[in-house]
């Protein structure tokens, strides 16, 4: 059997080109090689207050974009985390096998607590345990992780090993999957930090649904440096970021792009990247409009995904409950 791979994205903001290059593009390849689950992690999302109407539509929008980008709902399991109660059930059990000191060391909690200082809730603190439940519930072998989630996956492994040492071989121990080039796309206005859908500055991101004029304007404003030559270098994070984006959407190497455009100048190079992005996103945006307009289809995909996810999750949850001594529910 193929190994199981799981990866989820929070339902907030707008999916951007960083999500496509760092995650969805790789998912399209991985769906042919692995048993893939792509949960829409709505339970994680509410650690920050959401507008209910926007939150609901964000779910449908993300599903439509997944499909428009090339993910096959028959080949993959695409579902809402909240539609499979086993996520919350296992999370509570794993809470009882996770130490406060471990969660206190999570740097992402500290960062988010500073950002959302008026809403430092228990869910935000407990976020990594729910993530562990998401992963362990499906006997996941591989988890694509960026630098910001690496610590959480390490905690997941620690929890799984602790539980297995007590009760036997209950959970598969997940390994990180390191995607190829382009896993980390940086902000346009501050190329030293990751492009994020929660960024308060819209000029930092290129969303998958940005119009051609918006894309041109954002690329025109993108921060570079005082040099004029186009080549990748740690001291040129802005140009390196634009080269990384262009390489990912054209399937060229950075070396090839450097050879072709080294002397073109920054202004022309930004225009070139903008036009390449517009051309790349056009078919995705057209397909999105068609899919997103069919709410019946989107609901059907989520319902079928939830059913398949439940069937995959139940054996693990049952095994955990049995070894702990819970009385099985009567039917």
Image (cartoon, rainbow, N blue to C red):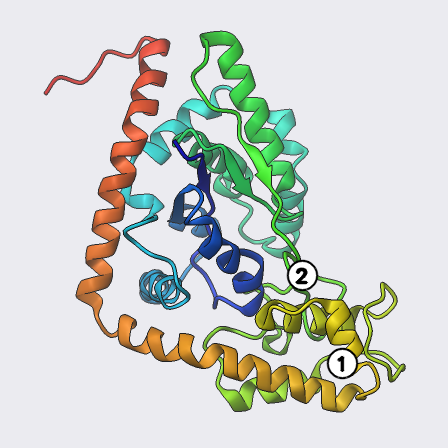
- The quadrant of the image that shows the C terminus is top left
Above or below, comparing residue 165 to residue 199 in the picture: above
SS of the residue under disc 2: loop
- The quadrant of the image that shows the N terminus is top left
When asked about the image quadrant of residue 250, the answer is bottom right
Q: Classify mark 1: residues with Cα within 10 Å, few (<14), some (14-19) or many (20+).
A: few
For marks 1 and 2, the one nearer the N-term is 2
Q: Position of residue 161 (x, y in %)?
A: 55, 18
Above or below, comparing residue 79 to residue 139 in the picture: below
Horizontal side of 130 relative to 265 (left or right) equals left
Residue for badge 1: 260
Q: Which mark is nearer the camera, 1 or 2?
A: 1
Q: Classify mark 2: residues with Cα within 10 Å, few (<14), some (14-19) or many (20+).
A: some
Mark 1–mark 2 contact, CB under 8 Å? no
Horizontal side of 42 relative to 152 (left or right) equals left
| Residue 76 badge | none
Residue for badge 2: 194
Q: Position of residue 67 (x, y in %)?
A: 35, 63
Can residue 267 be seen in this snapshot? Answer: yes
Above or below, comparing residue 166 to residue 34 in the picture: above
Spatial CA distance of label 1 from label 2 is 27 Å
SS of the residue under disc 1: helix
Q: Position of residue 176 (x, y in %)?
A: 59, 38
When asked about the image quadrant of residue 224, the answer is bottom right
Instruction: Using the image as rendered, state which of residue 53 and residue 151 is in the foreground.
Output: 151
Can residue 78 be seen in this snapshot? Answer: no
Q: Position of residue 88 (x, y in %)?
A: 36, 34
Q: Residue at x 33, y 17 (%)?
A: 319
Q: Residue at x 47, y 20 (%)?
A: 96
Instruction: Using the image as rendered, state which of residue 159 and residue 71 is in the foreground.
Output: 71
């Amino acid at each position: 059997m193929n190994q199981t791979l799981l990866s989820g994205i929070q339902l907030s903001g707008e999916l951007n080109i960083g999500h496509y290059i760092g995650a969805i593009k790789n998912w399209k390849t991985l769906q042919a090689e692995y048993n893939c689950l792509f949960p829409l992690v709505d339970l994680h999302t509410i650690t920050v207050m959401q507008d209910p109407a926007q939150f609901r539509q964000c779910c449908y929008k993300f599903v439509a974009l997944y499909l428009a980008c090339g993910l096959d709902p028959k080949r993959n399991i695409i579902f809402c985390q909240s539609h499979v109660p086993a996520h919350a059930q296992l999370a509570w059990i794993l809470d009882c096998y996770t130490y406060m000191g471990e969660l206190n060391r999570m740097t992402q909690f500290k960062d988010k607590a500073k950002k959302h200082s008026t809403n430092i809730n228990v869910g935000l603190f407990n976020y990594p345990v729910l993530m562990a439940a998401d992963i362990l519930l499906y006997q996941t072998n591989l988890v694509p992780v960026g630098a910001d989630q690496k610590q959480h996956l390490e905690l997941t492994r620690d929890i799984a090993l602790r539980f297995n040492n007590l009760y036997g071989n209950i959970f598969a121990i997940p390994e990180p999957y390191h995607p190829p080039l382009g896993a980390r796309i940086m902000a346009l206005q501050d190329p030293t930090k990751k492009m994020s859908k929660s960024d308060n500055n819209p000029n930092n991101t290129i969303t998958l649904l940005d119009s051609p004029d918006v894309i041109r304007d954002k690329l025109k404003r993108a921060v570079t440096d005082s040099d004029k030559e186009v080549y990748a270098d740690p001291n040129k994070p802005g140009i390196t970021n634009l080269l990384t984006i262009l390489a990912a959407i054209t399937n060229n190497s950075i070396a090839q792009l450097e050879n072709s455009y080294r002397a073109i100048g920054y202004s022309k190079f930004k225009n070139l990247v903008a036009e390449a992005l517009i051309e790349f996103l056009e078919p995705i945006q057209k397909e999105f409009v068609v899919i997103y307009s069919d709410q019946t289809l989107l609901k059907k995909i989520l319902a079928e995904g939830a059913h398949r996810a439940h069937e995959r999750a139940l054996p693990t949850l049952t095994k955990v409950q049995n070894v702990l001594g819970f009385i099985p529910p009567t039917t």
